[in-house]
Image (spheres, helix red, strand yellow):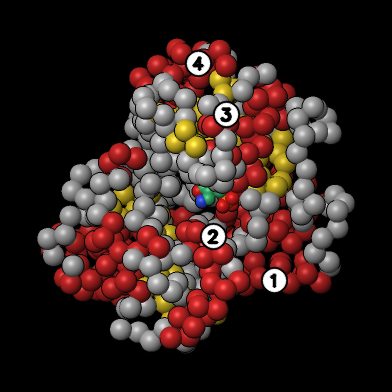
Amino acid sequence: TMNRSRSEELYKEALQHIVGGVNSPSRSFKAVGGGAPVFMKKAHGAYFWDEDGNRYIDYLAAYGPIITGHAHPHVTAAIVEAARDGTLYGTPTEHEIAFARMIKEAIPSLDKVRFVNSGTEAVMTTIRVARAYTGRSKIIKFAGCYHGHSDLVLVAAGSGPSTLGVPDSAGVPGSIAQEVITVPFGDIAALEEAMQRWGDNVAAVMVEPIVGNFGMVMPKPGFLEALCAVTRKHGALVIYDEVITAFRFHYGAAQTYSGLPQADGAAASAGARDFAAVEPDLTALGKIIGGGLPIGAYGGRRDIMEQVAPLGPAYQAGTMAGNPASIRAGIACLEVLRQPGVYAELERLGAALADGIAAAARSRGVALTVNRIGGAFSTHFCDHPVTNYDEAQDTDGDMFARFFRLMLDQGICLAPSKYEAWFLTLAHTDEDVAYTIEAADRAFGQL
Ligand code: PMP
């Protein structure tokens, strides 16, 4: 196996000073058998180099934002220029207007936007705005969807589909959990039941329109349409959490998705859907739109967004919000992504890699469910489709942990989580894909 002694030393040191040695729990190797995570020193294009000098092909992509590849020259130039011009002003800048326009052009349901610093903040604020607009307090969300770490979304399902939630983290008060109902993803009957019972007090229904957090999961045809209809019948707002999905599969969001761009310019037949038949009232964004710097954004219908201070009574602020470095990196990233052929290339690479991995698993007799949308796909060690969180939970975590380590030792970096997607970037090559398929085949052979 690979020598990672420097990572091991650094991990011991980190444990003395940083809680758990990591600044986000998903980075720890707790879910894959523990031990030292790999301390990376440098990232360029599709590769990482760790503190021992080992090279890895990166499919973590920082949990999604790094879609252009690391240190993309156009994005890097924008960050360098922003640093030269001063990184933080506490005043408005023209860049913010340019970026707001770009995002609105790509996602027309956003009449007005506000930039914040993370996906967590974006989601948290959409909930406040929905509460302010409706004068109601409860929200409904779907099991297995992740919406950041604010109190209201760290709540688990109660004992039945329409029961009030229970805290999903220590420190979340039971009183807050009672404001949240969690129903199975894709289950309109459960949503209707919850609405029958609590509808008069529901401010919003929050959903990942295409799920990225328990695997890559397309909603069943008609699900989002029915979700919007039921929600609006009860006077509540629809919030799409597009922190993962926006600018992931095409130049736009899940809400403007109408099939994946193909290399030959035709829309894909498999998975081609018109999501634009319904629109959310509010949308939360993050990840890709920061080009690798911290960002979040939320936006939506004008009359709803005008609830936000300084125009309206719903307060939201931020010292770092809209900082010129994040905004200019975001603009540069979207400039790269709107070039013709970008998403067709991600689709081509994604198909080659996911199909190769699925074929290798089959030939080695390993049960593996691969869900792919464009350049992002999930791999669940189970023998049935994954369309909701219950199905995802059947994933064999021990098997994933062994696979994860076998891949790491062959120089391939995945997220240390059995649900997290693999993300292709514009920097990955056919050679990277071919090597990864061979490595996966060897790993499956050793499982
Ligand atoms: N919503 C979704 C759908 C996410 O995937 C994430 C992060 N994985 C968040 C919200 C939270 O974003 P952040 O980590 O930037 O706070």
Q: Position of residue 287 (x, y in %)?
A: 57, 54
The image's mark for residue 198 is 4
Question: Which residue is depicted at the point 51% across and 15% down?
Answer: 199
* Quadrant assignment for the N terminus: bottom left
Q: Which one is in front in this view, the residue at disc 4 or the one at disc 1?
A: 4
Q: Which one is in front in this view, the residue at disc 3 or the one at disc 1?
A: 3
Q: Position of residue 46 (x, y in %)?
A: 47, 72
The image's mark for residue 175 is 3
Q: Position of residue 127 (x, y in %)?
A: 62, 32
Distance Cα–Cα, label 3 vs label 1: 48 Å
Q: Callout 2: few (<14), some (14-19), or many (20+) C-alpha neighbours within 10 Å?
A: few
> Callout 4: helix, strand or loop?
helix
* Left or right of residue 211, residue 133 in this image: right
Q: Which residue is the site of mark 1?
A: 77
Q: Which one is in front in this view, the residue at disc 3 or the one at disc 2?
A: 3
Question: Which residue is depicted at the point 67% across and 31% down?
Answer: 128
